[in-house]
Image (cartoon, rainbow, N blue to C red):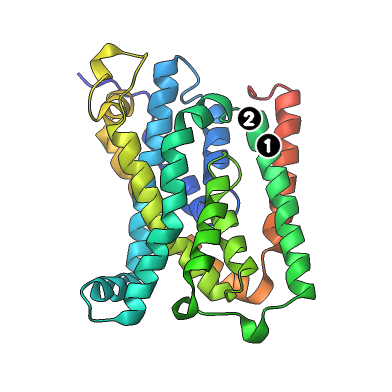
């Protein structure tokens, strides 16, 4: 009989946290780590932690589906481009792939080291605060040196711009940094308009998150339970620990909340900019640090 170590309400909560924070520049990984610590999920044996990490990655599938639905026109445009029917769609598809390649290479090389050394709370807190300071610095720079005519649109992107954004995305492999933070700020720094920077971040995220989700599902779970030291080890372990129902419910919650979050973010950034997220990150980092020092939950 399948043993469930996660309540349905917990999978919903984690799904909502994932969906809301995945595409905001606040770090979904950092928020999920804190939420799991508070709920006591993945805090037991190494096997429990491996299952919790796999669950957090796999519910990203819901967030991916939300972006695919919202930006279906761009997806169709890229498909038409790959079929030789839309030159602008082909350029966009090439830029997405070029932007993804640095993360692909460094992810293969550094993934195990990052999981072993940077998934503690103090590295996450440091990344939250430093990322917040970075947002405020980019905001100040944008005020002094605004991009001409609001910046370039997606169709005007160059390969060089895609490479720079892709390299910055690699920084977000450190938990707490935020992939969206690095790619949106990267887009603004290379001269994209706010809308183009956000849309490129979302579309690049679809490819990056899909690859991360697939990798975590098929990774071998070495050094833990020998029963899972095989293909699809991470997925098997997660399903045994938490059950298929929790995965489905968490993914649906992530999809719905991500769709709402993405629609809101595009509108908000065009009117107000990134500064509020900088202040938020600094405040959350400081708050979590205080709670750990007060031993409210483990660091």
Query: Label 2: how many residues lie within 10 Å, few (<14), some (14-19) or many (20+)?
Result: many
Tag count in the figure?
2
Q: Residue at x 42, y 29 (%)?
A: 52
Compared across the picture, whether 119 is left or right of 205 comes to right
Residue 87 image point, x, y percent: 32, 81
Residue 255 image point, x, y percent: 37, 54
Compared across the picture, whether 55 is left or right of 112 comes to left
- Label 2: element kind: helix
Q: Residue at x 24, y 15 (%)?
A: 227
Q: Residue at x 50, y 53 (%)?
A: 20
Whether residue 246 is visible to the viewer of this picture, yes or no, is no
Residue 183 image point, x, y percent: 55, 59
Residue 253 image point, x, y percent: 39, 49
**Labelled pair 2, 1 in contact (Cβ < 8 Å):** yes
Q: What label does residue 56 carry, if any?
A: none
- Label 1: element kind: helix
Looking at the picture, tell me which residue is in the foreground, 165 or 270. 165
Question: Hey, which quadrant is residue 218 in on the image?
Answer: top left
- Dividing the image into 4 quarters, which one contains the C terminus? top right
Q: Residue at x 31, y 13 (%)?
A: 225
Query: Label 1: how many residues lie within 10 Å, few (<14), some (14-19) or many (20+)?
Result: many
Q: Which residue is mark 1?
A: 125
Question: Hey, which quadrant is residue 224 in on the image?
Answer: top left
Q: CA distance from mark 2 to mark 1?
A: 6 Å
Q: Which residue is mark 2?
A: 121
């Amino acid at each position: 009989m399948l043993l469930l170590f996660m309540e349905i309400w917990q999978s919903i909560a984690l799904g909502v946290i994932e969906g809301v924070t995945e595409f905001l520049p606040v770090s979904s990984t950092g928020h999920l780590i804190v939420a799991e610590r508070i709920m006591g999920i993945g805090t037991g044996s190494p096997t429990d932690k491996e299952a919790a990490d796999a669950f957090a990655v796999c519910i990203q599938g819901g967030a991916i589906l939300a972006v695919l639905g919202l930006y279906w026109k761009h997806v169709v445009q890229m498909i038409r481009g790959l079929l030789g029917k839309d030159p602008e769609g082909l350029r966009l598809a090439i830029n997405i792939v070029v932007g993804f390649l640095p993360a692909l290479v460094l992810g293969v090389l550094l993934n195990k080291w990052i999981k072993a050394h940077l998934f503690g709370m103090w590295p996450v807190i440091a990344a939250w605060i430093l990322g917040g300071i970075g947002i405020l610095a980019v905001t100040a720079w944008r005020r002094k040196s605004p991009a001409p005519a609001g910046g370039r649109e997606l169709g005007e992107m160059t390969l060089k711009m895609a490479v720079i954004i892709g390299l910055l995305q690699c920084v977000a492999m450190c938990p707490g940094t935020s992939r969206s933070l690095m790619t949106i700020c990267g887009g603004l720094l290379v001269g994209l308009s706010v809308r183009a920077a956000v849309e490129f971040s979302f579309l690049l995220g679809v490819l990056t998150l899909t690859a991360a989700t697939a990798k975590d599902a098929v990774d071998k779970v070495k050094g833990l339970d020998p029963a899972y030291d095989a293909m699809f080890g991470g997925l098997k372990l997660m399903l045994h620990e938490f059950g298929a129902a929790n995965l489905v419910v968490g993914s649906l919650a992530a999809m719905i909340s991500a769709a709402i979050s993405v629609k809101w973010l595009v509108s908000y950034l065009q009117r107000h900019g990134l500064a509020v997220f900088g202040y938020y990150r600094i405040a959350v980092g400081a708050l979590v640090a205080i709670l750990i020092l007060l031993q409210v939950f483990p660091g």
